[in-house]
Structure formats: C-alpha cells, structure tokens
Amino acid sequence: MRVKLTLLIVSILFLPSIQIPIASISPNFSYNYPLISSPDYGVSNYNIAHSVKYQVDINFTLTHKAGIGSYIFKFARLDNRIPNSTFTKFTPPYQESILLYNEIKGPKPISIRKGHLDKFNNTYDSFNATLLPLSPILSNIIPKVTLSQKYVIELNAIEFQGIEDTDIGSYDPSDKIFELYCNNPEQYYERDDLTLISLSNNIVNFDDNPIEKAEKIFNWVSDNLDYNGNLSSQEKGALWAYNNLEGDCSEYSSLTVTLLRIQNIPARKVTGFLLSNDPGIHPKSGDTWTFHASESTSNIIGHAWVEYYIPNIGWIACDPTWNSGSNYFNRIDFLRFNLNVGANFFFPPSSTVSEYLNPLFSHSLGASYEYDYNIKVSVIESNVTSLNSDIQFIFIVIVIGVICVIGTLIFLSKRNRRRVEPRII
C-alpha cells in the first residue's frame, strides 16, 4: 500500500511579512482534560484481542552543508494513549507508550523545548538552531543537530462488540470535544458543504443510533472510493474525495470524518506510520523492522485512519482504507504507531500543515543540508499466534481425531468378528 503520508518537509524563507493570527493556532494552547472518577474513565465495551510490545529507537541527524542555515524543528512524540492518561481522555489503550530516552544535541546557541502540547494534546519536541558550514576557524563546531529517542510501546488490537442502545450515553454539544472535532468546518473537512450534507443524510436513517450511522458511513466510503496510491503528496480533502470517488488513506479518512461530523458525531483523523501494510502479518518476539528517510528517499509507511466518539463508550478506531477484505469497523490492530490526532497543525513560525509525520522542519532560503531519519522497531513480547501455527495446530488435532476414529472402528470391527465366529468343538 502506498500512502501519501510519507515525508513532510517545509522549506520556508522566514519573512516578517507572513502574518497569521497566532492566537487561533498558538502552540501554547492546550486543553488538558481532567481525569474522571469512574473506574473505566468513560471507556467501555472494548476487548483487547492481541497485544504486541515493541522497542522503538528513533534517530535523526541533520548536517548543514552551505549557506547560513536557520532551522526550526518540530517532532511529534509517540503518545501514551490509554484511558487514565490526562491528555487522552476517553481513549482505550490503543498505544501504551513509555519514553525511556530523549536527547537533542546541537551547536550553541540551540533553543530546545521538550514535551509541549498542542490544542489536540499531541506532544512535541521543538528545537531551533542556526548552523554555519564547517570551516578551519570553527573546526570544533560541527554544523549538525541530532535527536535520539527510545520508547517501549505496547500496541493493543482492540475490538468494540455488543454495544446496545442503552450503553450509549448522551452527547454534550458544549463539550470541548465538539469544538475540536465536530462543529467547525475547516480546510479539507467541509462539513458545511451542501453536497456532502445531502450525501451524509442519504447514507443514514434519522432514527439510527450513532454507531449505526457510523457503520453505514464507514461502509459507504469503503465501498465507493477507489484506492489510488499515485496521488501527489498534497492533501485533497473530503469534497475532492467525493467528487472524484478516489483517494489514498488521507482522502478515505477525511471523507469519513466529515460525513460523521455532519451527523453531529465527533470524529478525527489519526496519523502515524505502519509497521507493515500487510494486515496478515503476525509479529513475534525477536522480529525487527528498520525504516529510513533522507532528503531523496523514504520507506516509512505513513498512514491515516479514523476515530469517532460515543459517550460512555469512548473514541472508537476504524480504518476505512483497510476495510476491503478485512473488517476494520470498530476495530484496530497492532501495526499502527500513532503520532497525532486532529488536523491542520501549527508549525512555527506562522504556518500550518494538514497532516503530521516526522521528520518535519523548516529552513532559511539558500541553506544546503542533508539528513538521515531512522526508525528501528523490535518486538519484545507478543501474544499473537501466527496463522501458520494455527493451521498446524488444527491439522494436528484433525489428524489425531481421525486416527482415534479409525482405531475405534478397527477395535469395534475385531470385537464384532470374534462374537460371530463359530466355536470349534
């Protein structure tokens, strides 16, 4: 599967004439959801089918080559997305993340800001540096910056099952969730477009509950869009996806989110990267994967999927792009590493990006550089049984059963023959 979320690099000349109302997109704004008192933290009716624990090592190095390089870096962290997290309210344990190591280095002066939040409560490390080419006079100052991180990440394959009407709570339109993920039309999510409004209302029935509406919308998008892995990296959006009935994971997700929001169901895009684009893969202890990106190449499998919110149930994950051949409604697997939820993210000094995947940085005009971004994923523990092992086990059970049946029939046949043989006197 080729996805559009591959490599995002912003090349901008820092001009004072660029004016965007910073108050509306300030990176300092964050809505820190309070913990709620109930034991399930507002999340229920989910089942953890499988779990895989990974070690994830991330290393980034940028080396400045020529010109005066003024660089701004903003890297998203692999968030800890569990029910009792202060920052991921109503989220099942999709991604249990522990950051073991986080180091940023560069020649002084370098400005570093670690672990800050955006308005969606995504977590970032930001750092700025001005780099000069290596010279004999400044031979002790190496013109490069590095970021190194190490995580332990547990990804849980989660399914939502057996949700009754009585399990579903009531929406509160005044909740911050609606402001962030439902009420407002925005770039690529045209919830006020009359064509999309008509489409959404025609897909669902008025008396459907929110989950029934979500399933019908999910199936419509999966059934009616054709996957196109050759699209440009530029985001297209929900209306474009409907008008053209095609897209990659970004368009599948944007259209699904928008049609849900039209039904007043909070929904959001989730972005990150895939361990593999093969849904049948079964990670086992000791397996490793390596991914690399540079200024010219990348094999990082960027991906986008969807979460929608149901009161008393929580944020339910779905993947409309992967639904063909496998049911990814109300379930997600252990192959997706999440970096961000939401859309149209602030990037300093005064711009936005529609989707977020590391590495993301900007530089002054004329700067020449090269960089390496490496991700190594190692499986620490896995309770996933491979399909081959399952087949082998079933085959062995069948063989043993057949042998037992044949043995029993032979025994009964011999016993019956002894009973009918004439006695010799």
Image (cartoon, grey):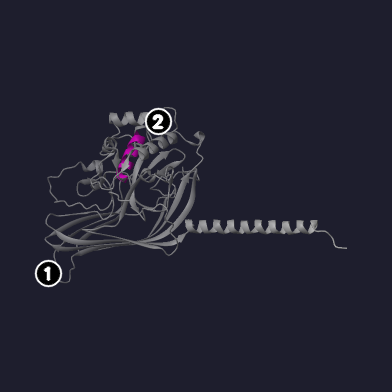
| Residue 94 place in picture, x, y as percent | 42, 50
Asked if one can make out residue 122 in the rendered structure from this viewpoint, the answer is no
Amino acid at dot 2: Val
In this view, the residue farthest toward the right is 425
| Residue 266 place in picture, x, y as percent | 37, 37
Residue 206 badge = none
Sort mark 1 into few (<14), some (14-19) or many (20+) by Cα contacts within 10 Å: few
Q: Quadrant of residue 120?
A: top left
| Residue 91 place in picture, x, y as percent | 42, 46
Amino acid at dot 1: Ser
Q: Looking at the image, is 382 positioned above or below residue 246?
A: below
Q: Looking at the image, is 108 positioned above or below residue 317?
A: below
Quadrant for the C terminus in the image: bottom right
Asked if one can make out residue 411 in the rendered structure from this viewpoint, the answer is yes
Sort mark 2 into few (<14), some (14-19) or many (20+) by Cα contacts within 10 Å: some
Residue 251 is one of the magenta-drawn residues? yes
The residue closer to the viewer here, 77 or 349, is: 77
In this view, the residue farthest toward the top is 206
Give the SS element for disc 2: loop
Q: Image check: 107 left or right of 46?
A: left
Magenta residues span 249-261
Give the SS element for disc 1: loop
Q: Which residue is mark 2?
A: 204
Q: Image check: 232 left or right of 385?
A: left
Q: Which residue is mark 1?
A: 135
Q: Looking at the image, is 309 positioned above or below residue 201?
A: below
Task: Give the residue at x 14% y 68%.
Answer: 134
Q: Image check: 414 left or right of 23?
A: right
Q: Quadrant of residue 421?
A: bottom right
The residue closer to the viewer here, 328 or 244, is: 244
Question: Marks 1 and 2, how far apart in space?
Answer: 66 Å
